[in-house]
Image (spheres, rainbow, N blue to C red):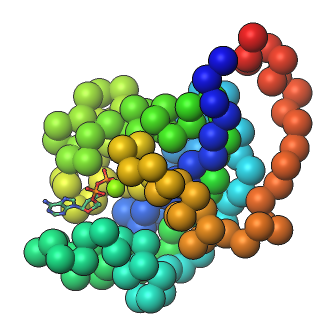
Amino acid sequence: MADTERTFVMVKPDGVQRGLIGDVVSRFEDRGLKLVGGKFMQIDQELAEDHYGEHEDKPFFDDLVDFITSGPVFAMVLEGQDAVSQVRTMMGETDPAESAPGTIRGDYGLDLGRNVIHGSDDEDPGANEREISLFFDDDELVDWDQIDETWLYE
Ligand code: DAT
Ligand code: MG
């Protein structure tokens, strides 16, 4: 069996303003991913710069920080088999215009700078753990058994 993992996921300010929190969370619940942390919050400048630190030399960095601090976000931690890459697959490509219908960005977005959702990078080992600890204290994450787990996994 593949590894059980946790990944950091966030509905960005555009998704919150457009009333998409419920739809996005529903997709993950329907897939069988388990919510182990959730927080409706406003990201400040320092957290934004830390979170997107890998992009600090990119020309779009300032716009990215301005955007992610422009309104509330819904941050969450999801757990499941291969959760990091499964979430990335469900998100689609970075650019919604190149994302297939059926993916979150392919169904809800059109523009690179308004791509609705963040999910930890599946090609950067440890990105999930780093982002989870940036946004959540240990005591904000809940270990729990979901009733459908015996029917979800062999
Ligand atoms: P992802 O969000 O798919 O992990 P990323 O980590 O490469 O993508 O970039 C972080 C965010 O920065 C992305 O969601 C949107 C924005 N972004 C990425 N590339 C960009 C570009 N070339 N121009 C403008 N914004 C960009
Ligand atoms: Mg990324």
Please tell me in which quadrant of the rendered image residue 93 appears. Answer: top left
Could you say which is closer to the camera, residue 122 or residue 32?
Answer: 122
Figure quarter occupied by ligand 2: bottom left
Q: Which residue ends up furthest to the top in the rendered image? A: 154
Could you say which is closer to the camera, residue 89 or residue 129?
Answer: 129
In-image side of 4 versus 21 (left or right): right
Could you say which is closer to the camera, residue 82 or residue 89?
Answer: 82
Instruction: State the image coordinates of residue 100 (x, y, percent, origin top left).
Output: 26, 28
Residue 128 drawn above or below residue 99: below
Please tell me in which quadrant of the rendered image residue 150 appears. Answer: top right
In-image side of 31 versus 112 (left or right): right
Residue 151 drawn above or below residue 44: above
Q: Residue at x 19, y 55 (%)?
A: 112
Instruction: State the image coordinates of residue 107 (x, y, percent, origin top left).
Output: 33, 36
Q: Residue at x 51, y 41 (%)?
A: 84
In-image side of 94 versus 22 (left or right): left
Residue 30 visible, this orientation: no
Instruction: State the image coordinates of residue 55 (x, y, percent, origin top left).
Output: 25, 70
